[in-house]
Image (tube, helix red, strand yellow):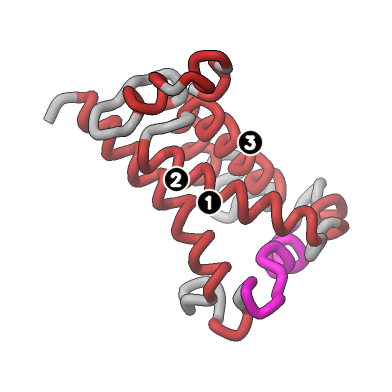
């Protein structure tokens, strides 16, 4: 397989890394979110992680926003749009940069990481997203996306 194809596989896998938790938290599929804790039943998708899993020097800031409705919506919409953008290869720059920011914030929330004093999967995925941000990959809708008038007028949407 050519490297472009491997970058497509990486892009799609990272997309599912964002899209899966969206559906799990929305519907309570029982993987990390129990059925009775779904967002559709009125539970906060951010509360558990921000209130209980945060540690380190920034824990106070993350605990303070745990369960905030605005943070919940921002997180869930972010997971959905980043996941869709990566899977379909559209809005790659904003998807990759937004995904990197989300992963960096999650890394800050768990400092120091559990298995290594500095590096964990959040940073590795973030670097992978930064690499993908400006790469055109096959098996995507990028040609169609970049042909849209709104995207031609707003290059940041590429």
The disc label shown at residue 101, or none: 3
Query: What kind of element bears circle 2?
Result: helix
In the rendering, at what x and y percent does residue 18 appear? Answer: 49, 51
Q: CB of mark 2 within 8 Å of CB of mark 1? A: yes
Q: Which residue is mark 2?
A: 84
Dot 3: within a 10 Å radius of its alpha carbon, few (fewer than 14), some, or many (20 or more) residues? Answer: some
In the rendering, at what x and y percent does residue 86 appear? Answer: 42, 39
Label 3 to label 1: alpha-carbon separation: 15 Å
The number of discs equals: 3
Query: What kind of element bears circle 3?
Result: helix
Instruction: Examine the rendered structure and indicate whether residue 50 appears above or below residue 43.
Output: above
Residue 103 included in the magenta stretch of the image: no
Residue 143 placement: quadrant: top left
The disc label shown at residue 80, or none: 1
Residue 73 placement: quadrant: bottom right
Instruction: Examine the rendered structure and indicate whether residue 96 appears above or below residue 25.
Output: above
Residue 66 placement: quadrant: bottom right
Q: Earlier in the sequence, mark 3 or mark 1?
A: 1
In the rendering, at what x and y percent does residue 42 appear? Answer: 71, 76
In the rendering, at what x and y percent does residue 155 appear? Answer: 54, 15
- Describe residue 93's horizontal placement relative to residue 90 as left or right: right
Query: What kind of element bears circle 1?
Result: helix
Determine the residue located farthest toward the front in the rendered image. Answer: 149
Magenta-highlighted residues: 39-54
Residue 41 included in the magenta stretch of the image: yes
Could you say which is closer to the camera, residue 103 or residue 98? 98
Dot 1: within a 10 Å radius of its alpha carbon, few (fewer than 14), some, or many (20 or more) residues? Answer: some
The overriding secondary structure of the stretch rendered in magenta is: helix
């Amino acid at each position: 397989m050519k490297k472009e194809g491997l970058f497509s596989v990486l892009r799609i896998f990272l997309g599912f890394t964002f899209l899966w938790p969206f559906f799990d938290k929305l519907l309570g599929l029982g993987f990390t979110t129990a059925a009775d804790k779904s967002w559709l039943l009125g539970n906060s998708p951010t509360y558990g992680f921000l209130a209980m899993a945060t540690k380190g020097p920034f824990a106070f800031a993350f605990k303070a926003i745990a369960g905030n409705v605005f943070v919940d919506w921002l997180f869930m919409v972010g997971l959905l749009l980043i996941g869709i953008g990566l899977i379909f290869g559209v809005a790659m720059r904003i998807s990759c940069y937004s995904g990197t920011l989300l992963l960096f914030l999650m890394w800050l929330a768990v400092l120091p990481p559990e298995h290594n004093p500095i590096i964990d999967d959040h940073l590795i995925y973030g670097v992978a997203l930064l690499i993908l941000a400006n790469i055109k990959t096959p098996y995507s809708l990028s040609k169609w996306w970049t042909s849209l008038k709104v995207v031609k007028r707003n290059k940041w949407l590429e």
